[in-house]
């Protein structure tokens, strides 16, 4: 079954159709956490039950909730754009994602966090309260 991620505020598709692999399935290999490389191949989302941990200003935090979905940034549609809040765009070579949601839907809703910095795996993590999965049409 393939699903698309949609903005809960306006209903627009935020991704192309994706196969979702569950971290609870023993047959599924967990994603590679290699710095600078996508955590998942294009077309695949991973449902994790162990959220990615972050440190911002020496305060350990978790990014999102459980389950947490990890998507390849290349699967996002062109409607997704960066926030204009410069305080959420930190990073040396890309976005470190440590300062809160940094991606917006075209309607303006904050839909998730993109991590693309050299010291992080490349991943988009949708905000569960403002996004929803729908089966492909």
Image (spheres, rainbow, N blue to C red):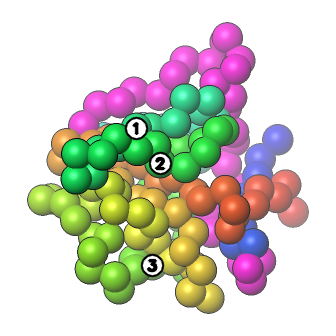
Q: Quadrant of residue 28?
A: top right
Q: Which mark is residue 126?
A: none
Residue 85: % across, % down = 34, 82
Q: Which residue is mark 3?
A: 81
Residue 127 belongs to magenta span: no
Q: Helix or strand or loop: what does disc 2 sit on?
A: loop
Q: CA distance from mark 3 to mark 2?
A: 19 Å
Residue under label 2? 63
Query: As drawn, is 55 to the left or to the right of 38?
Result: left
Question: Given contact means CB atoms under 8 Å apart, are the residues at marks 3 and 1 in contact?
Answer: no
Q: CA distance from mark 2 to mark 1?
A: 6 Å
State left or right for residue 66 relative to residue 36: right
Q: Residue 115 location in percent, x, y? A: 35, 54
Extent of the magenta region = 9-36
Q: Nearer the viewer, mark 3 or mark 1?
A: 1
Location of residue 110 in the rendering, given as x and y in whole percent from the top left corner: 54, 74
Q: Secondary structure at mark 3?
A: strand
Split into 4 quadrants, where in the image is the C terminus? bottom right
The reply to whether dot 2 and dot 1 touch (C-beta < 8 Å) is yes
For residue 24, above or below residue 128: above
Q: Going 52% across and 63% down the picture, which residue do you hit?
A: 112
- Asked if residue 127 can be seen in this view, the reply is yes
């Amino acid at each position: 079954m393939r699903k698309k991620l949609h903005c809960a505020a306006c209903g627009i598709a935020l991704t192309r159709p994706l196969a979702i692999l569950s971290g609870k399935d023993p047959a599924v290999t967990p994603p590679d956490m290699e710095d600078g490389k996508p955590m998942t191949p294009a077309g695949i989302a991973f449902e994790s039950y162990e959220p990615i941990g972050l440190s911002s200003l020496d305060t350990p935090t978790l990014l999102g909730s459980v389950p947490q979905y990890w998507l390849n940034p290349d699967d996002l549609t062109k409607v997704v754009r960066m926030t204009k809040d410069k305080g959420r765009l930190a990073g040396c070579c890309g976005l470190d994602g440590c300062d809160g949601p940094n991606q917006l839907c075209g309607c303006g809703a904050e839909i998730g966090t993109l991590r693309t910095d050299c010291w992080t795996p490349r991943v988009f993590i949708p905000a569960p309260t403002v996004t929803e999965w729908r089966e492909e049409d």
